[in-house]
Image (cartoon, rainbow, N blue to C red):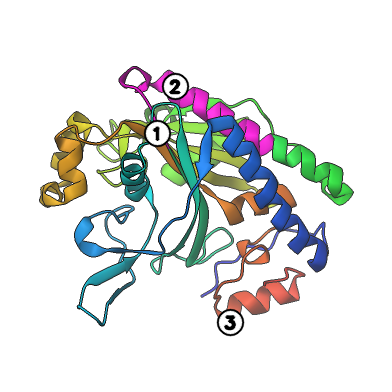
Amino acid sequence: MSKVIVPQAYHTRLDIYDMQKAIGMVHTIFERNLSHALHISRVSAPLFLEASTGLNDDLSGVERKVNFDIREDGRQCEVVQSLAKWKRQALKDYNFYAGHGLYTDMNAIRREEELDNLHSVYVDQWDWEKVITRQQRNLDFLKETVVDIVGAICDTEDELRQRFHELKTLPLKNRVVSFVTSQELEDMYPDLDGKGRENAYVNEHHTTCILQIGDDLKSGKPHDMRAPDYDDWQLNCDILFWSEILNCAIEISSMGIRVDAKSMDYQLNKSGHNERREFPFHNAILNDDMPLTIGGGIGQSRLCMLLLGAAHIGEVQSAVWDEDTKKICKENGIFIL
């Protein structure tokens, strides 16, 4: 059954031709702004990884990966779900040093996604990663990086509004970030679930960063699930903006300071995934043989939705949708690519 939401009196700001042009401009302008803000350089990235390396992202740990074997020698490969661990390995292999990093286009297939206005089986994002020092493994540095990313997003919006006057009817995004921890959210809204808390808070503060996601809260449950082997649960966050069109919060980025030996040891124990210690990547971190890093993913299609005033992710990316969704969208002026 379709889960598509049709906003009341919705209309696209841009026609099909200008929408395609604007999508290309978002990519070009934002990549430039992000690269400058974070001191990161573009690199090539894999579409799939060998399963034996343990480098593929496990997301919340329950998603089935798309996999296949290589005919020549039978090696098992997996289509990436994200590049969270691969990027850190690449920083080591490419000899990056503190203060500098990389970004890349990440294209993934997540077949477990429940399709709606914001979720697609096809995932496209800017994956980025940067080497940091031991002294930078703190919340203040994480917050500074969040402010830099939000600034890059708002600078991109400013340029788009100059090129496409139709976009000036959209509310301007707030550059001021409201920071809140997942425990503070639970304390504020004890009767709501995680998504309900996010919507309640972001509705009031519009540009929000939710800190410390993955570990159990006072209720005994986490705000949201996080894999145990890339973000440090005490030093990670999500960046969300309020969508006036969908009347809900849109998560644009999940990011964080990555695990060191101590936090990975704790999180593998806590999550019951000690078998991962045998993977080369995990073993290297536990033996302090991997650079300390910060990194994350920034949704390309979601950012296009946010900045171009789209109501459905299918308006800004070409993917696969059920017949009900296509029918409802067509009847309500939502053009699905």
In primary-sequence order, the first of circles 2 and 3 is: 2
User: For residue 139: magenta?
Assistant: yes
Which secondary structure, mark 1? strand
Circles 3 and 1, Cβ within 8 Å, touching? The answer is no
Q: Which residues are magenta?
A: 130-154
Q: CA distance from mark 3 to mark 1?
A: 41 Å
Compared across the picture, whether 59 is left or right of 200 comes to left
Q: Nearer the viewer, mark 3 or mark 1?
A: 1
The type of residue carrying mark 1 is Ile
Would you name the residue on which mark 3 appears?
323
User: For residue 144: magenta?
Assistant: yes
Would you name the residue on which mark 1 appears?
294
Compared across the picture, whether 67 is left or right of 115 comes to left
Which secondary structure, mark 3? helix
Q: Is residue 113 above or below residue 147?
A: below
Which secondary structure, mark 2? helix
For the view shown, which residue lies furthest in the right direction? 165
Q: Is residue 126 above or below residue 136?
A: below
Compared across the picture, whether 260 is left or right of 79 comes to left
Circles 2 and 1, Cβ within 8 Å, touching? The answer is yes
Circles 2 and 3, Cβ within 8 Å, touching? The answer is no
Would you name the residue on which mark 2 appears?
141
Q: Is residue 120 above or below residue 241?
A: below
